[in-house]
Amino acid sequence: MLPKAVLFDYGMTLCTEPPINRDRGAELLLRHAAANPHHVTPKVLLDQLDRVHGGLGYFVGEESRRDPDVLYQQAMEENFCAVLRYTLERLDLVLDVPLQRAEVLYWDACSPGSPAPGVQAVLSRLDSLKIPYGVVSNMCFAGDTLERRLFSCLPQANFQFILASSEYAFRKPHRMLFEMALHKLGLSAGQDVWFCGDHPVCDVEGAAGVGLRPFWVRLYNDFDRLTPPRVPCTRIAAWPEFLKILEEQAPEI
């Protein structure tokens, strides 16, 4: 049976990104400094950002940044614009661009996005089948920033909505973020809604916990590198595999 709707994660699902380069992001922000009375360097800027992250209970330093338990077990999401505002004002830095534009510039410099191979064919097929789809992403950046990134990578997509956790308080795997997505779809758990994402806990276990059918998407086919989800799921190593499953459910014309 075809799904009534499909929900997607953003990172390493709809889009791919190279490893984050925070130095490049900090350097770009400082190039937009209209005032830098203390001659703040990229290292000082990043250290202050980490200090604010730490004050909020999020990752601090490179070791905790590599520990998924530090980040993925947080129920509440941070807001990068608020973190950046505090950091800039604490360092007496003034930028020549608005705060949300600075957020976009920072993310694009740190980790530019590209469409995942084959995903546009999946979205186009969902459109032809009249199956609605949306995005549910753990994202510290603003919803508008995420929307800009998605439509830059996938300009033909017809997302019903794009949920960034930064604007809805909760992070996956908390059920309330999934419940908001179901509410926006006008559906309830168990109504044949599929969820596609790369993280075994946030995406797979979180989706299963509210009655969605989870698809574990690992576009580099590195399933063996990770602890598998503790719930049944369908593994997808490339988007044509998902498209094949979708076609098997489609009625013959």
Image (tube, grey):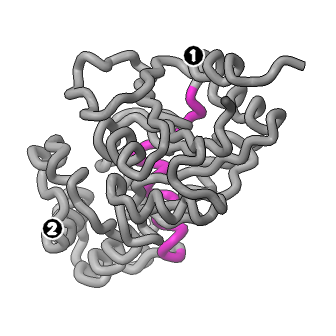
Q: Residue at x 41, y 25 (%)?
A: 218
Does residue 166 lie above or below 117 as drawn?
A: below
3D distance between C-alphas at marks 1 and 2: 39 Å
Q: Quadrant of the N terminus?
A: top right
Q: Please report whichever mark, 1 or 2, sits nearer to the chain's N-terminal start.
A: 2
Q: Residue at x 83, y 34 (%)?
A: 128
Q: Main secondary structure of the magenta part?
A: helix
17 or 183: nearer the viewer: 183
Find disc 2 in the rendering and name its residue: 57
Kind of residue sitting beneath label 2: Gly
Does residue 147 lie above or below 51 as drawn?
A: above
Does residue 198 lie above or below 104 as drawn?
A: above
Residue 241's label in the rendered image is 1
Q: Residue at x 44, y 28 (%)?
A: 217
Residue 56 makes an appearance in the image: yes
Residue 17's label in the rendered image is none
Asked if the residues shown at circle 1 and circle 2 are in contact, with their CB atoms under 8 angstroms apart, the answer is no
Q: Nearer the viewer, mark 1 or mark 2?
A: 1
227 or 17: nearer the viewer: 227
Q: Residue at x 76, y 29 (%)?
A: 125
